[in-house]
Amino acid sequence: MNARHAAIFFAAGLFLAAAPVRAQMLDAAPCPSTYEGDVPLTLPAAVDLALCRNAQVHGAWAGIRLQAAGVGEARAAYLPTLNGSLSRVHDRTAYPGARTASSSLDSNTGSLSLSWRLFDFGGRAAGQRSAQALLDAALANRDAVLQKTLAATVSAYFDMQTARASVRMRQAYEALAQETVQATQRRAQRGLGSHSDTLQATSALAKAALGASRADGDERKARAVLVYTLGLPAGTAVLVDDDGDGAGAGSGAGAGWRDDLSAWLALARERHPAIVAAQAQLAAARERLAVARSEGRPSIDLTANIYQNGRPNQGLSPASTRETLVGISLNIPLFDGFARHYKVRGAQAQAEQREAEAQEVQQQTLMDLVRTHAEASTALANLSAAQTWLDAAQDALASVQRKFGLGAADILEMLNTQSALLEAQQERIRCQAEWRSARLRLLASAGMLGRGDIAQEGGASGGKLRASTAR
């Protein structure tokens, strides 16, 4: 995303190719026609579905075409205007009561007029620059809409993966609780345990089943949100690629994410669509001020006219004539009731307003970036700590299971160890979700979130976001 290149726009049915237009474009991808419900949905495929079905994206593209037409209209002011007319006239004159016979005259008349503004103290140039700035603002607005759609899609996709990970974790915990019940029953049959141990294990199994049921409900809600975000019909059975243990990021997940905050701020100033759009709106307002000032200054026009058999709306001549006029006119505005003065003051006030808005947008955007950068750093550290906790809890459970099988551990120690493992697994999933959300918001806050930043990594087909800071 945000790679500057030449683009050609169609506007009002006309092909505008007078000059290349600098644009910020996202990687293009063909729109998928359908979604096969039995095929797992990858993250890039989900992004394609959302971008193709989002109404705001279509509206942003329409806004670009509208401003492209404005650029073409501004360029047209440099070209001459040519008008022609043809007419067939029949003139019959009668003399009632006189001996003179009536007379008639037929004539073909035509005219051709050319007008070309040669000089206007920069009004047309300022108008063209203003139109180009508005086009840049429309392009930046399109990028902002795309980023918003991408962020919503990736967030919904990751939420679905997180919900799937929670379901798998709860199902595994339920299976572990079932094994514990069976183990306590075998111990009771051998006289190594009491009926109370079996009841406690059965209670833990019921609690595990309840947790699995709630996790399944959360997954259904996450799937419904994802279906709505993708613009698919309600009730569509969406399958997402499994993310293994829900990690999607190993020990090297934070590579490139602990960059200096000043580097992220510099990227945001340069590339964030909101800042780019505000700066473009400010440039357009300043050019409109130049246009307003030029309207009160002199202009020079070249005119040329050709008349065949008389001028329009004049009487006919029996002789065939051709008249040619060429002239240069100097137009000097003298007084218009101070209308231009107030128009200039209004344009100047609008430019000042746009400047204040641009400063506010930049300040707010950079403030959001500072917060999200801190949150991403914290989330990454929490993810590493949660993984260490989970490894320790798994080792502890394996040790207690061996002791429990040998009769060296009681049911309370077994259940407490299982509960500790469940808590560690839940915290691991929570930290993973926080990390995904934080890095997503960090990319969006820096104006770097694009379809090209969504890539599949190795066997984790769920996808990963990466920062292309080397662009």
Image (spheres, helix red, strand yellow):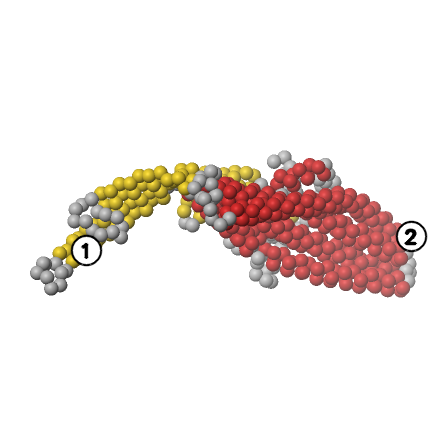
Tell me the crowding category of disc 1: few under 14, some 14 to 19, or many 20 or more residues within 10 angstroms, Cα based. few
**On the image, which quarter does residue 3 sit in?**
top right
Q: Position of residue 79 (x, y in %)?
A: 39, 41
Which numbered disc, 1 or 2, marks the residue that appears first in the sequence? 1
Residue 90 disc label: 1
**Of the pair 282 and 67, the residue shown nearer to us:** 282
Q: How far apart are the two marked residues, 1 and 2, measured between alpha carbons?
A: 123 Å
Label 1 vs label 2, nearer the camera: 1
Quarter of the image with the N terminus in it:
top right
Q: Where is residue 404 in the image (x, y as percent from the top left)?
A: 87, 53
Whether residue 261 is visible here, answered yes or no, is yes
Q: Residue at x 91, y 52 (%)?
A: 408
Q: Which residue is drawn at 83% across and 49% down?
A: 393
Q: Where is residue 281 in the image (x, y as percent from the top left)?
A: 57, 45
Residue 290 disc label: none
Quarter of the image with the C terminus in it:
top right
Residue carrying label 2: 408
Q: Which amino acid does label 1 sit on?
A: His
Residue 7 higher or lower than 412, as above or below = above
